[in-house]
């Protein structure tokens, strides 16, 4: 196995072993705490532009399973403590190493991922590179920015997804980097889904008279998507609307609120979320580096908060017939505790 380096923008260097593609890549280094679900992590479009570090030490033991992919892989690099060279699973069709090689993505293993995670938690997410030789200058690394990534991950044309069984509702899903699980949850509840590119206009969506609109997850800084925010503003109040992750953030921006970048974000399958007007705390999957600033809300009210740091995890917009959440109720590989939010969306469209 070849020698490789993980170089951080602050000058810290970690020596390890390379796997995946033999290329050099720069990205924003983030960590995710999921103990399972590395397949879904690698295929989540919300990681576009980022080098992903898995805090769980062993990755790849059940191989790669295309049926479990959430979308196309857009990560810049992959960092693990140990990767399994000989996975065993009757559903698998390949290894993590082969998956990364086929897509031109470098990986690095054999480094102290706990030490890297602690550095990010203290200093915040920062740029990094995976390389075979430590560069003389870090200027190019420091200049890197995750920009215009929604345009890179969205679909190019509309697509139809039939309901499972009889179709009771028609849902327009705007794809900012949508996970396949969102579509799957809607179809399972009797929704025929039309998925649109992120650039679709509100006029085009409303002309089809959908029963509801779903705003998907996606990568990057929500505030840079000015056109998308404008179209969301034109949709609000016209039709029942449910937003997830980036869709949640851009809905807040469309109603006059602010978003800001977090120190290291929430990524993993163990984020506790508490109902503001209830007594329940739910364990959720999340993947985001930006938050809605609760005090900046001009419309609606905060419905969920993160039990760890008190950040906004959901907003209700009663006057606009809309609600949004920061976490993923469609989470795969789990937990599935908040999938009831899809049922609530069905109720908003007139279902039971």
Image (tube, rainbow, N blue to C red):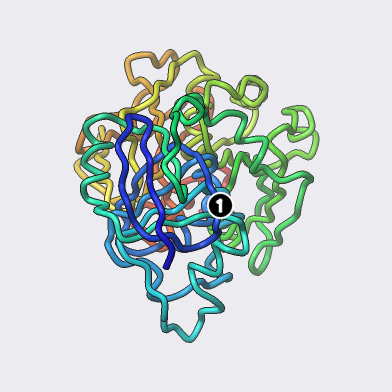
Residue 212's place in the image compared with 114, above or below, is above
Q: Quadrant of the N terminus?
A: bottom left
Classify 296 as above or below 201.
above
Q: Nearer the viewer, residue 174 or 105?
A: 105
Q: Is residue 237 visible?
A: no
Which residue extends farthest front?
A: 136
Labels in figure, total: 1
Left or right: where 75 falls relative to 266:
right
Measured from the top left, where is residue 94 in percent x and y?
54, 76
Q: Tag 1's secondary structure?
A: loop
* x and y percentages locating residue 21 in the rendered image: 55, 59
Residue 162 sits in which quadrant?
Answer: bottom right
Badge 1: few (under 14), some or many (20 or more) residues near its Cα, within 10 Å?
some
| Residue that mark 1 sits on | 23
Q: Position of residue 286 (x, y in %)?
A: 38, 45
Residue ranking furthest to the bottom: 90
Can you see residue 256? yes
């Amino acid at each position: 196995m070849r020698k490789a380096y993980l170089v951080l923008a602050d000058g810290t260097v970690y020596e390890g072993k390379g796997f995946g593609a033999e290329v050099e890549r720069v990205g924003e280094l983030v960590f995710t705490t999921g103990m399972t679900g590395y397949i879904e992590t690698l295929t989540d479009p919300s990681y576009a532009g980022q080098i992903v570090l898995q805090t769980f030490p062993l990755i790849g033991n059940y191989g790669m399973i295309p049926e479990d992919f959430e979308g196309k892989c857009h990560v810049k690099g992959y960092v693990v403590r140990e990767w399994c060279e000989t996975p065993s699973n009757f559903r698998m069709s390949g290894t993590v190493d082969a998956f990364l090689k086929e897509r031109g993505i470098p990986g690095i293993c054999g480094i102290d991922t706990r030490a890297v995670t602690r550095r990010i938690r203290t200093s915040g997410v920062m740029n990094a590179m995976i390389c075979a030789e430590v560069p003389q200058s870090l200027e190019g690394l420091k200049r890197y920015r995750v920009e215009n990534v929604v345009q890179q991950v969205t679909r190019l044309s509309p697509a139809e997804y039939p309901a499972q069984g009889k179709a009771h509702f028609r849902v327009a899903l705007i794809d900012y980097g949508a996970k396949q699980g969102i579509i799957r949850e809607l179809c399972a509840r009797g929704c025929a889904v039309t998925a649109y590119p992120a650039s679709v206009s509100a006029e085009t969506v409303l002309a089809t008279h959908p029963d509801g609109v779903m705003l998907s997850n996606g990568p990057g800084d929500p505030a840079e998507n000015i056109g998308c925010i404008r179209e969301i503003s034109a949709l609000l109040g016209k039709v029942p609307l449910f937003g997830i992750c980036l869709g949640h953030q851009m809905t807040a921006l469309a109603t006059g609120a602010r978003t800001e970048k977090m120190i290291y974000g929430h990524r993993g399958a163990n984020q506790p979320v508490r109902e503001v007007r209830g007594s329940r705390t739910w364990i959720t999957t999340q993947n985001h580096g930006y938050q809605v600033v609760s005090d900046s809300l001009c419309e609606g009210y905060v419905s969920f908060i993160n039990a760890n740091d008190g950040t906004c995890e959901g907003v209700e917009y009663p006057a606009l017939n809309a609600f949004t959440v920061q976490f993923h109720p469609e989470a795969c590989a789990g937990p599935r505790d908040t999938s009831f939010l899809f049922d609530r969306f069905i109720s908003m469209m007139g279902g039971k």
